[in-house]
Amino acid sequence: MTSNRTLETTDVLICGCGPTGAMLSGYLDRMAVQNIVLEREVEITTDPRGIVLDDDGIRYMQGLGLYDHVYTDIGSCIEKVLFLPGEQQSLNTRPIFGFNTASVSLLKFQSISWYETFPTNLCMNQSEGYTGHVGVISHKQPALEKHLRSVIQGSQVSQLRSRCTLKSIEEDKDWVYASYEDSEGNSRQIRARFLVGADGKTGYVRKQYLEPRGIKMEWAEQCRYEEIWVALNWKISLPTPETHPDFPLWKLGYSSEDVYDHFFPKDFRFLCNPRRPAVCGRFGQTKDRLWRFEFVVQAGEDPEEMSAPHMIQDIVFPYLRHAGARYGLDADVEFPTDCINVLRSRPFRFAARKCNKWAMGRVILCGDAAHVFPPFGGQGIASGFRDAIALAWRLAILTRSRSTRLEHEQVLVGWYSERSQQFQKSLNSTLRNGQLVSSTNPVQNFIRDWAFRVVQLIPPIKHQLELGPRSEGPVAYIHSDGMPFLPYLHGGIAFPQTYCTELVGLDNRVRFTDDVIFSKEKTNLFQIVVLLDKPSQAIAAVEEMDGVDGLSDGHLSTKEATLLVQAKDCLPNDENTGFTSLSLFRTATAKEFEQSDLCVGRPKPHGYSDCQIWDVMKGKRFVIVRHDRFVYAACDTRAEMVEAAKGLGESLPLN
Ligand SMILES: Cc1cc2nc3c(=O)[nH]c(=O)nc-3n(C[C@H](O)[C@H](O)[C@H](O)COP(=O)(O)OP(=O)(O)OC[C@H]3O[C@@H](n4cnc5c(N)ncnc54)[C@H](O)[C@@H]3O)c2cc1C
């Protein structure tokens, strides 16, 4: 081995540049933590696997400055997620239920064109969650990864080394040593303070290094889900009267685009077909014309055989055959199969599992390397993102701290204990979707369908159902040892995001609150947000927290604090309150957001409430927010702020 004096050294070595590794490297860049990412492959995998990303995922992309690409290159909003019952192989069956879409009036729609009359004001495109974003987007994983990597490529502190494969790991008290094979086939050595295995579900770090040391990928609590699904990706080209002159819908006045919309509808569908559960929908941007169909492989079936063209004919193509009666025609109408280009058809094994520990010594597991999900919740990538952002600031503290009192094991246990709690929440919502789509018992399904129809007659229940997982409110951790937040000061809850604009300065752009709270020039990992009732309180609030940062061992800076007031509490002359700092912002209204650049390419923010931060923080004045957008403490008084600042310095000493 090379001597330590000549050995290449970095703070964090990341194995794997999938979405999780790339996001971690991106946030380490924001925190100026030196890191190197080793990636086995030359290029990003072009085969799209993940196609759904939730609002947390969008928020964390935004945190890396990638929001501009979300709706222009990466994906588009999924407006409705529908659950279709019955054995009929049709995408137009009346849904029993839909996230943020179903309404009482739905029950009246017996016709095949029910979806045309579906209410659009209550749908998945709402901003009723806690992030200011739509509930979910459908995306192209390669495009998402490309933009994540652009952060590394533009970085002074992050480096990506492609075609480099991790081969061995050793560690001592202070360092972890790794060897890898580089793109020329040479063996290289490197040491780092921490090594993160973001190398996927069969990666080296867990399988070869941590499993022999006792880490296990266990069944998730209360669930032994393991199934094989075939996942198809199709690229559709549009038929035209020139290419397909005999196609029967031209004479009824349909355009090529209409045909596409009818056969490949834009809403995402769970096909609760007891004979063959499936999910399908468009992904990427509309112009990409990409379509995903996933169906379950039943016990006794050969997965490879099930993904062969003749089985796809039987299982999928009937969904693309419409009864002629739908159009007033005698014969059935089939979408021209020569307009379908099969990009991929292959089986994947899915399970619900997570590791008993996600870190040991100086080696850490993140993303799919630490946990895996069934395919019906769109939680794989978002969970890897959550791991990454929550780990990045801890690694920044661990590599910056000069204190001997800071124990990395305890910090890492706190990290994965929090993450495990959220994993369980994500899994629960995934499994609820799974139970709906996979139930094969006809009696249970009959009861389920009618129960949904009946409860949706009660508007508040219907609305809760429509909100899906977001109806549960922001995630709140249950405190245990090593978790860096103060539960008795309202810590541990996810800090909501709304829209805002400067109150004092001339810049009247509408922005996301995270973008001002965690703006690029701010260096502290914990930020103070001051929630005012009116702008005139600003000067007094700043005076009240004066000097508190000095008690936090360098974690807080009152100079970096963001002051927020609600738009409704501002009067026309409030910018002249005498408070001149540019850190005073007022919330922006839904109307202002709608008219801003931030709304381009996404739906209007229906259901948005600009007082959400105040509601969730229950009227507290001073909030200390961690970099992963969770609350460390929320305080009413200076005395509480002093306590919180001291607590921060004691639990995460830097000096
Ligand atoms: C069919 C299918 C559908 C899915 N649908 C969704 C969905 O809709 N939404 C969703 O969120 N998720 C979905 N997922 C899951 C999602 O794709 C994963 O959760 C996600 O890719 C995990 O990201 P990761 O970075 O943790 O791991 P990976 O994406 O697996 O990345 C690991 C990286 O590590 C590299 N690597 C491995 N070993 C080494 C080594 N020794 N040295 C160097 N590099 C190494 C690999 O080359 C790879 O680039 C789906 C998955 C499949 C298969």
Image (cartoon, grey):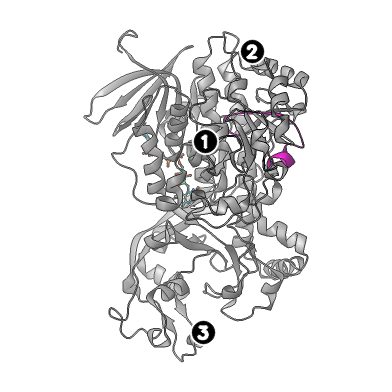
Labels in figure, total: 3
Q: Which region is colored magenta?
A: 613-629
Residue placed most toward the observer, 55 or 363? 55
Which image quarter: residue 102?
bottom right
Distance (Cα) linking label 2 and label 1? 38 Å
Distance (Cα) linking label 3 and label 1? 48 Å
Q: Ligand 1 sits in which quadrant?
A: top left
Residue wearing tag 3: 326
Question: Can you name the residue that lies furthest to the bottom here?
Answer: 330
Residue wearing tag 1: 370
Residue wearing tag 2: 550
Residue placed most toward the observer, 281 or 459? 459
- For label 1, count other residues whose C-alpha is less than 10 Å away and answer few (under 14), some (14-19) or many (20+): many
Per the image, label 1 sits on a secondary structure element best described as loop
Residue 254 on image: x %, y %: 42, 81
Q: Is residue 615 magenta?
A: yes
Q: Quadrant of the C terminus?
A: top right
Q: Amino acid at mark 1?
A: Ala
- Can residue 261 be seen here? The reply is yes
Per the image, label 3 sits on a secondary structure element best described as helix
Q: Earlier in the sequence, mark 3 or mark 1?
A: 3
From the image, state whether disc 2 or disc 1 is nearer to you. 2
Distance (Cα) linking label 3 and label 2? 72 Å
Q: Are marks 3 and 1 in contact (CB under 8 Å)?
A: no
Q: Is residue 103 magenta?
A: no
Q: Earlier in the sequence, mark 3 or mark 2?
A: 3
Residue 224 on image: x %, y %: 60, 47
